[in-house]
């Protein structure tokens, strides 16, 4: 009985010693883990470098601008009219494309043919008489005094011959006119384009000057806009002006500034040549006109702006690859560039991608150096 109690007591002591040892080891491990989680002197400090893309601030010639409405029009838009009278026999279908010289309408040619044939006969008759009088005059002239005719008679014969020759020439003019009227029964396209409307239909009678079809050149576009004289004063012929059609924009060259204003509105018309484009004739566009003279300013791409409710800023990258936030004011804008007023110098690298999450003083890695961006 005594031996059994001693064995139980020894086993209990052993268990207590083992439990204490494990508690000691476990406590040390917890302390080491806690120390590691608190970090030592070698642990990294602050956010990691941010990947950004940059561009250069540069000197640009800009001016404040104001938009005026405009429309896309064709440089050649004609209501092709009949040049002779007659019944309409055929008109080209709406929507077809034609080349210059193609027939786009036909007028009944019967009356024109009759007139032409009558003129031809008249020319032949008068030419026969003129030839007879010329031969008669030359015969008496060759006979001389043997003919027994006085000088007055010879003069009269020569006058009759000359009058007949002039009658022939007059008849030839009438014949050419009749032939022209016959040719005009086939109405031809004055330029290449597209038929956009039929003003008269088959069976109707057209007088000279009656509109038949509307023909529009769909290969050469321009923009027409009306602007106050104060804006038009800053526009010069040959200048490139930004034109927007929805989200699509392009530069158009000023072809003409019409220096005649409306008596009431005082608006002047501008004409701008468009390059090749898929815009439709009649599209409504916005024309960006300078409101003042062009100035040389410090400009950055619009993507460099970081907009907040209380400020507008840009991030400039220094030599230590750290981002410095600089608050700026905005000025003139043109295309992708905008004037900034603040502590930014031409040649400074400004962030154009990745600036939304940057912090002032944060390190960066430049993933793309785009240099001078283009408009």
Image (tube, rainbow, N blue to C red):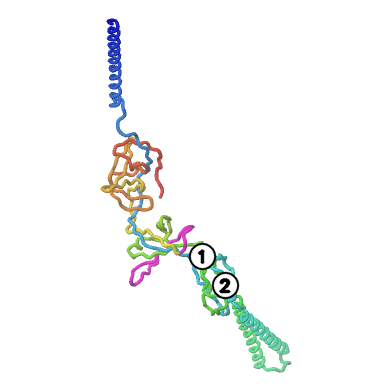
Position of 39 compared to 371: left or right? left
Question: Who is closer to the viewer here, 305 or 346?
Answer: 305
Check the image and report above or below for 266 versus 119.
above
- Asked whether residue 319 appears in the rendered view, the answer is no
Task: Tell me which corner region of the image, top left, top right, bottom left or bottom right, holds residue 231.
Answer: bottom left
Position of 311 compared to 336: left or right? left
Q: Which residue is mark 2?
A: 91
Question: Who is closer to the viewer here, 213 or 373?
Answer: 213
Disc 2 secondary structure class: strand
Question: Who is closer to the viewer here, 314 or 180?
Answer: 314
- Asked whether residue 166 appears in the rendered view, the answer is yes
Question: Who is closer to the viewer here, 58 or 157?
Answer: 58
Query: Local crowd at mark 2 within 10 Å, few (<14), some, or many (≥20)?
Result: some
Task: Tell me which corner region of the image, top left, top right, bottom left or bottom right, holds residue 110.
Answer: bottom right
Position of 82 compared to 61: left or right? right
Check the image and report above or below for 356 versus 87.
above
Mark nearest the camera among 2 and 1 is 2
**Residue 297, position as x, y percentages in the image:** 32, 50
**Residue 363, position as x, y percentages in the image:** 33, 35
Q: Which residue is mark 1?
A: 217
**Residue 293, position as x, y percentages in the image:** 33, 57
Bounds of the magenta segment: 255-281
Residue at image point 57% right, 78% down: 203
Tell me whether the residue at label 2 lies in contact with that at label 1, contact meaning CB atoms closer than 8 angstroms. Answer: no
Quadrant assignment for the N terminus:
top left
Position of 260 compared to 220: left or right? left
Query: Local crowd at mark 1 within 10 Å, few (<14), some, or many (≥20)?
Result: many
Q: Which mark is residue 97?
A: none
Residue 280 falls inside the magenta stretch: yes
List the single residue furthest toward the left: 310
Disc 1 secondary structure class: loop
Distance (Cα) linking label 2 and label 1: 18 Å
């Amino acid at each position: 009985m005594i031996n059994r109690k001693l064995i139980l007591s020894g086993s209990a002591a052993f268990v207590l010693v083992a439990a204490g040892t494990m508690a000691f080891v476990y406590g040390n491990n917890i302390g080491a883990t806690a120390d590691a989680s608190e970090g030592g002197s070698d642990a990294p400090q602050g956010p990691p470098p941010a990947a950004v893309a940059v561009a250069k601030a540069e000197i640009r010639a800009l001016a404040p601008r104001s938009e005026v409405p405009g429309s896309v029009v064709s440089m050649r838009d004609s209501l092709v009219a009949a040049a002779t009278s007659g019944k309409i026999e055929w008109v080209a279908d709406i929507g077809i494309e034609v080349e210059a010289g193609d027939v786009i309408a036909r007028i009944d040619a019967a009356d024109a043919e009759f007139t032409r044939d009558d003129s031809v006969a008249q020319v032949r008759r008068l030419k026969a008489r003129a030839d007879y009088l010329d031969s008669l005059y030359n015969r008496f002239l060759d006979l001389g005094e043997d003919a027994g005719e006085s000088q007055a008679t010879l003069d009269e014969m020569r006058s009759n011959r000359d009058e007949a020759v002039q009658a022939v020439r007059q008849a030839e003019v009438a014949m050419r006119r009749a032939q022209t009227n016959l040719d005009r029964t086939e109405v031809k396209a004055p330029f290449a384009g597209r038929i956009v409307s039929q003003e008269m239909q088959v069976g109707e009678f057209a007088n000279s000057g009656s509109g038949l079809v509307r023909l529009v050149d769909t290969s050469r576009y321009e923009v027409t806009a009306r602007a106050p004289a104060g804006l038009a004063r800053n526009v010069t012929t040959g200048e490139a002006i930004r034109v927007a059609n929805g989200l699509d924009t392009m530069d158009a060259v000023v072809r003409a500034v019409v220096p005649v204003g409306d008596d009431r509105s005082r608006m002047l018309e501008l004409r701008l040549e468009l390059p090749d484009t898929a815009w439709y004739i009649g599209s409504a566009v916005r024309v960006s006109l300078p409101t003042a003279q062009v100035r040389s300013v410090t400009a950055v791409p619009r993507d460099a702006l970081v907009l907040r409710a209380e400020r507008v800023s840009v991030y400039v990258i220094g030599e230590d690859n750290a981002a410095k936030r600089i608050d700026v004011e905005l000025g003139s804008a043109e295309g992708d560039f905008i004037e900034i007023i603040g502590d930014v110098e031409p040649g400074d690298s400004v962030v154009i991608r990745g600036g939304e999450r940057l912090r002032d003083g944060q390190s960066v890695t430049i993933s793309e150096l785009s240099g001078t961006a283009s408009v």
